Amino acid sequence: MLTRPDFSYRSDPQVPTFDDRFPIALMDAECALCCFGARMIDRLDRSGEIRICPLQTALGRALLSHYGLSVDRPDTWLLLERGRVLGGFEAMIRVGERSGGWGRGLSPLRILPRALRNLLYGWIARNRYRWFGRGDLCALPAARLRARLMSDPP
């Protein structure tokens, strides 16, 4: 379902209007592994452009739904960049490449066939709470990370 046309969310009345000039990483804010990923984005993305949108926000839920993904069991990472969406390891690899430095360490995953990457990602995603526990991305993050977080309007 991630094969929708670029910027298709702009014409979806269920998706709130948002600033899409910068890349947006959508991730589970209750997953410890995803929280680690958010901290790594903050540490490695020296441009400061990559925003982080928790899947639990109204925008996160609307985008999941728009792309045909489960709102109740979010098990993927999404990246919106220039209106195009990537999911799973593809999203993580792109964020790593864009961030540079150690982030590029994810690039060798491309050696694996896409089907195998998707299976591996799905296996990790299904077991992430059991293996890594739960976290709270929005609980008192550092000021720099807090500036990247997209939240629901008050």
Image (spheres, rainbow, N blue to C red):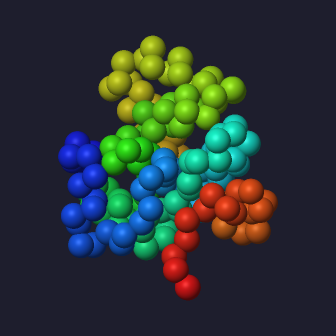
Q: Position of residue 17 (x, y in %)?
A: 37, 70
Q: Quadrant of the C terminus?
A: bottom right
Q: Position of residue 88 (x, y in %)?
A: 43, 40
Q: Residue at x 64, y 41 (%)?
A: 47
Q: Is residue 23 left or right of residue 130?
A: left
Q: Residue at x 61, y 34 (%)?
A: 99
Q: Residue at x 38, y 32 (%)?
A: 118
Asked if residue 50 shows in the view, the reply is yes
- Relative to 90, say whether 59 is above or below: below
* Residue situated furthest bottom in the rendering: 154
Give the camera-side residue of 116 and 35. 35
The image shows a total of numbered marks equal to 0
Give the camera-side residue of 78 and 11. 11
Q: Answer with the quarter of the image where residue 73 lies.
A: bottom left
Q: Position of residue 151 (x, y in %)?
A: 55, 71
Q: Position of residue 62 (x, y in %)?
A: 35, 67
Q: Is residue 37 left or right of residue 108?
A: right
- Relative to 120, say whether 127 is above or below: below
Q: Answer with the quarter of the image where residue 142 lies.
A: bottom right
Q: Residue at x 48, y 47 (%)?
A: 23
Q: Is residue 48 left or right of residue 63?
A: right
- Relative to 131, say whether 148 is above or below: below
Give the camera-side residue of 7 and 110. 7
Asked if residue 133 shows in the view, the reply is no
Give the camera-side residue of 46 and 123. 46
